[in-house]
Image (tube, rainbow, N blue to C red):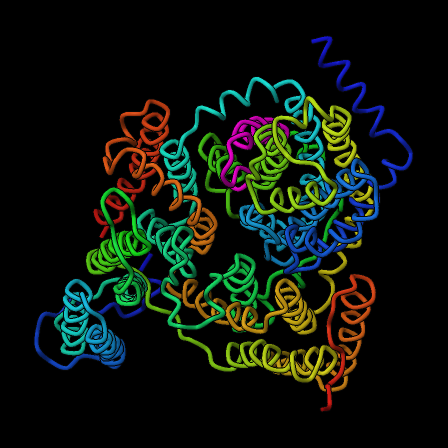
Amino acid sequence: MSDLLANLAMGFHVAANPYNILFCLLGALVGTLVGVLPGVGSVATIAMLLPITFGLPPVGALIMLAGIYYGAQYGGSTTSVLVNIPGEATSVITCLDGHQMAKQGRAGPALSIAAIGSFFAGCVATVLVAALGAPLTSLALLFGPAEYFSLMCLGLIFAVVLAKGSLLKAIAMVVTGLLLSMIGSDLETGAGRMTFDIPELADGIGFANIAMGVFGFAEIIRNLELPPESRDILKTKISGLMPTRQDLIDSSGAIARGTLIGSLVGILPGGGAVIASFAAYTFEKKISKHPERFGRGAIQGVAAPESANNAAAQTSFIPLLTLGIPPNAVMALMVGAMTIHGIVPGPQVMSKQPELFWGMIASMWLGNLMLVIINLPLVGIWVSLLRVPYRLLYPSIIVFCCIGIYSINNSPFDVSIAAIFGIVGYWLLKHDFEPAPLLLGFVLGPLMEENLRRAMLIARGDATVFFTRPISAALLSTAIILLIIAGMPKIRRRRDEVFVE
Amino acid sequence: MSEDVNPSPKPPSFGFAISNASNLRGGSLVALCGLALLVATFYVSSPIVPRVVSIALILIGLGVVAGMVPIRAPRDFYGGLVLVMLATLALVSSAELPGQRGFAFGPGTAPRLFAGILIALGAAVSIVGLSIEGPQIEKYKIRGPVLVLAAIFGFAAMIRHLGLVPATFLAFMISILGSTEMRWIESVVAAAAMTLFCVVLFVYLLNLPFQLWPRFY
């Protein structure tokens, strides 16, 4: 315990250096500004801003990157709320209720709650990272490929359970996402799969292209065919930027639970923050007395996933700093940044460069504080974006998304792919398919396949390995139980409908 | 509930009478796609599963045209069939990839595995569409989608050759035509402002290597 305090004190000493505070503030500010642009998520933001950190000292550079990360993450959820375009997979779920709140004129409270929830989650997760970093490393070491595969199955089942409408269709969407993720070069042999001999497809389809297509472009196309007066955000009056006392009371439980779930799930590598936000939302919906409010602008539906993804975003530094495994795309960029500064991520960081390790942990907390300070006053500015008439807003979003996609790889082909997924998303809407599970399946697909292949190879082709290894069996049975529980009331409701007819 | 959405629900008919226009259109589309997939299977070496599925699709499509298929929820029915087609296409396109060798998965194993699962799931969704009443498919609009997509594809086509400024301006102008409320002067001003903003942001602030104007060789 005294070790922990001494370490944290050292961390804060490093982070409280005026230069480092400045880097942190700058990172959070720039990250938010870029992240708030529709279609530019945290991965793209960090990738774009990585070069400016090259000239800084290593600690300052990493602190600034962490600031950019939180800022962009927060900015990404801002676009989820305001224009229904998730900047990142982690804020997909925030769209569901956040955008509904915005449509009801409550964009301000939604954004404030997201900031407050994130800050609370950040505080708790920082302490957790500091306290549990070392012991949890040993738990993460118990995970073999079979366990990872089962964990991802569980994550996907979570995604399915939370989707609106038919369970069957949600599962079908997950599998469609998995299948789409296999397009491109095979990880092990390099063979081109389902590329139809198009060279640009050899690298696969980018996550950002699909996300912008099925969420951004499809939503715009959809909105255009509605009569102007029913068109969501612009006509509603925006009442109050700050959450009311009732909002705070309503969301406090959700924030606490979201933080807990996020911290736990984030430690496990493999899209931790994504699964965390989905899991927190599902859990919140299941225990709520009014589950019917979810998807219609429930503030808990914003508070829980936003707290969870922030907590998970922080605890996902644990695998990076302790095992050297980047659990998501952002962390992979962090690995790149660390390598450029001559730091090899892995267990030795904690022992060899304690200042860097603890300084970074302390700066996470600082970064979150900055976010609240920066964003609560700025909420008004983001919200005023909604006052722009839709007929001018949507071409701007389209142009922005186009430039954003193009800037990732300088590839016009990527822009066309996003357009194609715009059509796909429009079709999905017409047929009552949910795009969120598709996106999650797509994100987890490559990891899932890789671990499935490894697990099968290690088990010498014996598929029962997923049920004979205890952790894996526990994860899979949780998934199956979840599916059954989720299926039951639906089956019952379906039956009721049939009986009425 | 379905009564409100769908004012005149068709009673499921098992007769042979050529049925209404939507069945004719939907069924023939399904049959045509099935036919295209069937043709595609002749270009690959191990096509048994996709060939069987595409023949089944043709038969289902013809059945719909003939009014023999009692479609209760067209959104689910056609939605499921499209997933089946997608999975079949995946099967065809990954047919040439090497499969499992010993204990090791080949590059083709996982795509075929997931495509197989998707065929089953898509079929299940379609069957649900036959057994539970659901709303009709909403009409697809033409103007909005076409112009929005034209703007995006146009941007993709222009950015390399014309540079950022013309591409942004034109994409903005094309996409704004998709709305019925567009006004010319306002739109041109907004497009110019947006172009300026993007140039300042992406090129000067973020330092991205974009070409601004057409390059003349």
Q: Is residue A254 left or right of residue A245?
A: left
Looking at this view, name the residue that lies furthest to the bottom. B217
Q: Nearer the viewer, residue B40 or A347?
A: A347
Image coordinates for residue A328, horizontal then vertical, percent: 56, 43
Left or right: B25, with A367 as reference point:
left
* Residue at image point 43% right, 28% down: A143
Residue furthest left as drawn: B15
Snapshot quadrant of residue B6 = bottom left
Residue A270 sits inside the magenta stretch: yes
Measured from the top left, where is residue A22 in percent x and y? Answer: 88, 40
**Which residue: 66% across, 72% down?**
A399
Q: Position of residue B139 (x, y in %)?
A: 40, 75
Q: Does the magenta segment cover residue A48?
A: no
Can residue A250 be seen from the camera position used here? Answer: no
Residues rendered magenta in the picture:
A250-274
Residue B169 visible somewhere in the drawing? yes
